[in-house]
Amino acid sequence: MTGGAAAAMGTGGTGGAGGRGGRGGVGTSGNATHPDAALTPAPAPTPALLSRLSLNQETVRQWSLPELVDGCARAGVRGVGLWRAPVRQYGTVAAARLVRNAGIAVTSLCRGGFFTAEEPGEHRAALADNRAAIEEAAVLGTATLVLVSGGLPPASRDLAGARERIADALAELAPYAAERGVRLALEPLHPMYAADRCVVSTLAQALDLAERFPAEQVGVVVDTYHLWWDDTVDTQIARAGGTGGAGGTGGVGGTGGAASRLAAFQLADWITPLPAGVLLGRGQLGDGSVDLRRFRQQVDATGYRGPIEVEIFNPALWARDGTEVLTEVVQRFATHVC
């Protein structure tokens, strides 16, 4: 890496408040007294790991798309995760040209999904919007369209029925996406979002849906913020990776091997208290309770060598200078993830 952020990595991150201890999966605290501490040593950051860092656009929402691309290029961050609204505002073709000319890969596009409507007109509109999202992903050159599946319809309590409508939508959209070189990536969200945003709350539920389709058509997203609490997540990460993965290729354009369903790996920390509305409470790396390094080790153990995308929704970060935030992200990534 080059530029200010890369130079800052030599000093390491400033760290953050140590997370709290607990039992279970890869998400528990990474402080020195944690029973799994021996599994998560802090080796010197390697170029191979640092080369996989990707910055999600929402982490620096204060930046325009040109500012994002320029800032990442200056910092030596070679991947970005993009969101549809700002891309559309800039122009999808123009955005594709912008990132391509800067030598930056689009590691994911967010988001498609919201498949759970019961009313036929709403369902048809959702499918049409997702076809548009697939086409936008193809133009941007990313193979990963992240799907937030949708919450319960108004007055409904039928979680199983909502999940079946997701499967129905995938059956229609997965071949369409595959023809355009795009894989659909189901993202399980923390259960606190099940009512209004995503009835897929665990990695096991996401895999139960994804495994109805070819691995090259439908994969899953592992997001530390949403999955850190789940004491089965180690097993489910291994399941997502297939039979240990097939090696895959490295860097921001890498993969997890032919059998892997790991389409994307995203990082944010869990901090409390949660804000009103809970959506904007994702923490800077190292500020909360998630053992980020152990998550990365578990994902890498499957053979995944693709991008590691930092996606943080936090107004306190958005109020700061974008370059300062990016420099801190790189520092924290080196300290808490590598």
Image (spheres, grey):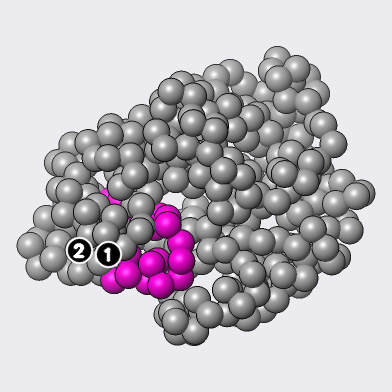
**Extreme right residue here?**
11
Dot 1 falls on a residue whose secondary structure is helix
Circle 1 residues within 10 Å: few <14, some 14–19, many ≥20? many
Q: Is residue 194 left or right of residue 161?
A: right
Instruction: Tell how many labels.
Output: 2
Q: Residues within 10 Å of mark 2 (few under 14, many from 20)?
A: some
Which element is circle 2 on? helix
* Residue 216, percent from left and from top: 34, 44
x and y percentages locating residue 84 in the rendered image: 42, 71
Residue 2, placed above or below residue 30: below
Q: Is residue 37 in view from this perspective?
A: yes
- The residue located at (61%, 60%) in the rendering is 79
Residue 7 or 275: which is nearer the viewer? 7
Nearer the observer, 190 or 272: 190
Reading the image, the residue beneath label 1 is: 130
Q: Residue furthest left?
A: 120
Q: Are marks 1 and 2 in contact (CB under 8 Å)?
A: yes
Magenta region, residue range: 132-151
Residue 67: x and y in percent read: 67, 78
Q: Which mark is residue 127?
A: 2
- Assess whether residue 138 is covered by the magenta stretch: yes
Mark number, residue 213: none
Q: Residue at x 29, y 71 (%)?
A: 132
Left-right relation of 212 to 71:
left
Image quadrant in which you'd find residue 136 = bottom left
Q: Say which amino acid is labelled 1.
A: Asn
The quarter in which the N terminus is drawn is: bottom right
Asked if the magenta segment contains residue 122, the reply would be: no
Task: Tell me how far mark 1 sits from mark 2, CA to CA.
Answer: 5 Å
